[in-house]
Image (cartoon, rainbow, N blue to C red):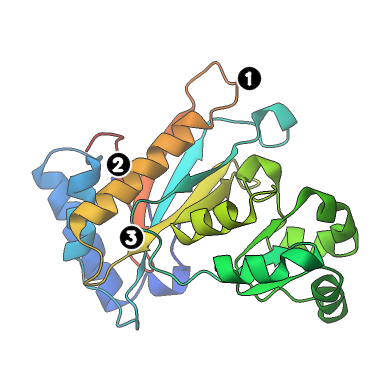
């Protein structure tokens, strides 16, 4: 039985010399430990020891969970958010859909873009989204109808369930800046979340803390309709590395 999942990697990279070397190192490590699953801290340590691509800010650390849900049933949708203790390592561009009198407030709180009719019209005309997260005041939500599909496809539609719709504009933006990440299962019932970067600013301890927060958030988001085993498997990987299966233990 294979002890390493490679499903999250682009197939053409699987034949690269670096990828094969990393795959072999993971295989040897798991074989030496006589297991196919590692505690979070050991998995992070293993990822950090792999050969890494020369990306400007370092490769991204990715968390992937296979869930025992039926994604076609509304009462089994897994959706939520998590505030990563040490952020994602990526600069997040925030857009705020607010009433005109709150535009300056949103900008002073850290929004990169803020507006209402003007911002909506710009997105409607261009059909493009140039931000990573959006927040909105409740009374502005109805105005987003003309661009709802565009925002939905880009996965940035504000939603009360993820804490991106509310009256406390400053708190919503500051929470996002603090490392808040939204998640939702995909069409196959899996969840994918960015947990940080592999670079000098992210120590092993910081990555472990982020991943622990992600696991806790996934567990907390378990739908009430699910009475059977909920999380089938969890894996960690960097941007182009093979993945390592993990337990929820440190």
Label 1 sits on residue = 225
Residue named by callout 2: 246
Dots 3, 1 in contact, CB < 8 A: no
Which of the two discs, 3 and 1, labels the residue nearer the N terminus?
A: 1
Q: Nearer the viewer, mark 2 or mark 1?
A: 1
Q: CA distance from mark 2 to mark 3?
A: 13 Å
Instruction: State the SS at label 2.
Output: strand
| 3D distance between C-alphas at marks 3 and 1 | 33 Å
Q: Earlier in the sequence, mark 2 or mark 1?
A: 1
Q: State if disc 3 and disc 2 touch (CB < 8 Å).
A: no
| Contact flag, marks 2 and 1 (Cβ < 8 Å) | no
Residue 133's disc number: none
SS at circle 3: loop
Q: Quadrant of the N terminus?
A: top left
Q: List x then y, in percent, for residue 50.
A: 20, 66
Task: Name the residue at 25% across, 55% down.
Answer: 206
Which residue extends farthest left? Answer: 32
> Left or right: where does residue 42 sit relative to residue 2?
left
Identify the residue at horizontal 25%, vertical 44% (top origin): 40
Neighbourhood count class around disc 3 (C-alpha, 10 Å): few under 14, some 14–19, many 20 upward: many
């Amino acid at each position: 039985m294979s002890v390493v999942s490679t499903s999250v990697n682009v197939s053409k990279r699987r034949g690269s010399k670096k990828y094969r070397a990393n795959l072999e190192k993971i295989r040897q490590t798991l074989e030496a430990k006589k297991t196919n699953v590692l505690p979070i801290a050991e998995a992070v340590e293993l990822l950090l020891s792999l050969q890494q691509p020369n990306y400007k800010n370092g490769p991204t650390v990715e968390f992937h969970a296979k869930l025992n849900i039926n994604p076609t049933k509304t009462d089994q949708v897994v959706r939520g958010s998590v505030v990563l203790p040490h952020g994602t390592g990526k600069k997040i561009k925030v857009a705020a859909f607010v009433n005109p009198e709150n535009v300056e407030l949103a900008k002073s709180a850290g929004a990169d873009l803020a507006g209402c009719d003007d911002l909506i019209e710009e997105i409607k005309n261009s059909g493009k989204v140039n931000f990573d997260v959006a927040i909105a005041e409740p009374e502005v939500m109805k105005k987003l109808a003309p661009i709802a599909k565009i925002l939905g496809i880009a996965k940035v539609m504000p939603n009360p369930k993820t804490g991106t719709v509310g009256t406390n504009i400053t708190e919503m933006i500051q929470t996002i800046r603090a490392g808040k990440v939204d998640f939702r299962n995909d069409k196959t019932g899996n969840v994918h979340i960015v947990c940080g970067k592999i670079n000098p600013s992210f120590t092993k301890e910081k990555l472990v803390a982020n991943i622990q927060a992600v696991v806790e958030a996934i567990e907390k988001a378990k739908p009430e309709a699910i009475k059977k085993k909920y999380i089938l498997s969890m894996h960690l990987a960097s941007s182009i590395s093979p993945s390592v299966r993990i337990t929820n233990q440190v």
